[in-house]
């Protein structure tokens, strides 16, 4: 009997050891959870602080951007007002269209040494009502072209001081064969020659108009298509200046 007692004592000590080991394991697990919670909490706190600082910076940037936008809007409005004023001033002081063309002609004349009083007189005379012949004179002009087999014509006006000639493109038939007249649907060139002066040329599709000053008269030309091979030249004489 005495030999069996130590075995029972050893058996009764095992639950205590298991309990101790369990408590130790729970303590280690709790310490790990506590440490992990602290690390995670610290990391989240750092991230939150970083994001809050970023939000603050962005808010400041947004405020600065808003102030800059307001200043730019003010500057834009002022610039637009200055532009409108400058455009109005330009329209008042700088001519355009016919007025600009007339101003350029006056400047060119003065640059070539023209008499300012004479230029002023010409402009004033141009503003007066024109005195013209009631009935224009009319002539037929044979138009020169590459396929013409006959000589081209010429007309003279202003007592022979102005000679008018014309040329155009050769008309063709439905088989593209050349005819003996010019093509009225294509551009023509009408040449006005005055003795001692460089000739002037008017080019385009008919009808055309042109003005020539010779002596104390202005000759107004109206040019239109006539019978085959010819154009009609109507000339109205007006007093000048």
Image: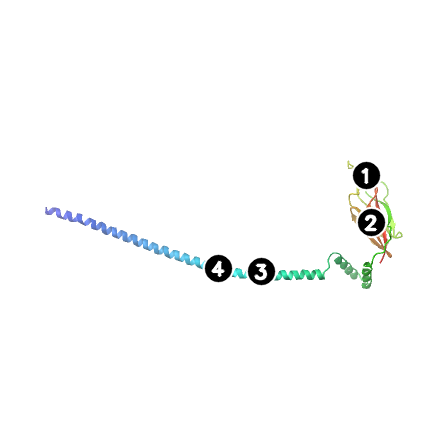
Residue at label 1?
179
The quarter of the displayed image where residue 39 is located = bottom left
Question: Residue placed at 63% from the left, 60% from the top?
Answer: 80
The answer to the question of whether label 1 and label 2 lie on touching residues, with beta carbons closer than 8 A, is no
**Quick check: can you spot residue 114?**
no
* Crowdedness near tag 4: few (<14), some (14–19) or many (≥20) residues, C-alpha within 10 Å: few
| SS at mark 2 in the image | strand
Q: Earlier in the sequence, mark 2 or mark 3?
A: 3
Residue at label 2?
222
Q: Earlier in the sequence, mark 4 or mark 1?
A: 4
Q: Position of residue 50 (x, y in %)?
A: 43, 58
The answer to the question of whether label 4 and label 2 lie on touching residues, with beta carbons closer than 8 A, is no
Q: Position of residue 53 (x, y in %)?
A: 44, 59
* Crowdedness near tag 3: few (<14), some (14–19) or many (≥20) residues, C-alpha within 10 Å: few
Q: Earlier in the sequence, mark 3 or mark 4?
A: 4
Q: Earlier in the sequence, mark 4 or mark 2?
A: 4
Identify the mark at residue 95; answer none if there is no mark: none
Residue at label 4?
59
Query: Residue reaching furthest bottom?
Result: 117
Mark-to-mark CA distance, 1 and 2: 26 Å
**Quick check: can you spot residue 210?**
yes
In the rendered view, how is the structure colored?
A: rainbow
Q: Quadrant of the C terminus?
A: bottom right
Residue at label 3?
73
> Relative to 219, does residue 86 appear above or below in the rendering?
below
Q: Position of residue 100 (x, y in %)?
A: 74, 58
Q: Earlier in the sequence, mark 1 or mark 3?
A: 3
The answer to the question of whether label 1 and label 3 lie on touching residues, with beta carbons closer than 8 A, is no
Mark-to-mark CA distance, 1 and 3: 70 Å
Task: Using residue 2 as the reference point, say whether residue 109 is left or right of it.
Answer: right
Mark-to-mark CA distance, 3 and 4: 21 Å
Frontmost of labels 1 and 2 is 2
């Amino acid at each position: 009997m005495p030999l069996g007692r130590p075995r029972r004592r050893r058996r009764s000590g095992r639950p205590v050891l298991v309990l101790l080991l369990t408590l130790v394991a729970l303590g280690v697990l709790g310490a790990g959870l506590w440490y992990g919670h602290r690390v995670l909490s610290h990391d989240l706190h750092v991230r939150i602080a970083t994001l809050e600082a970023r939000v603050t910076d962005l808010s400041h940037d947004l405020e600065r951007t808003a102030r800059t936008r307001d200043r730019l809007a003010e500057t834009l409005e002022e610039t637009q007002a200055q532009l409108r004023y400058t455009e109005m001033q330009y329209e008042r002081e700088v001519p355009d269209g016919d007025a600009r063309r007339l101003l350029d002609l006056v400047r060119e004349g003065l640059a070539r040494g023209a008499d300012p009083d004479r230029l002023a007189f010409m402009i004033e005379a141009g503003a007066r009502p024109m005195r013209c012949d009631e009935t224009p004179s009319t002539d037929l002009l044979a138009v020169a072209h590459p396929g013409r087999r006959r000589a081209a014509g010429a007309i003279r006006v202003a007592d022979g001081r102005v000679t008018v000639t014309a040329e155009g493109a050769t008309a063709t038939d439905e088989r593209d064969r050349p005819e003996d007249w010019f093509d009225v649907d294509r551009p023509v060139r009408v040449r006005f020659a005055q003795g001692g002066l460089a000739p002037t040329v008017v080019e385009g599709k008919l009808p055309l108009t042109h003005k020539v000053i010779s002596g104390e008269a202005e000759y107004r030309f109206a040019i239109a298509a006539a019978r085959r091979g010819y154009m009609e030249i109507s000339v109205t004489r007006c007093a000048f200046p």
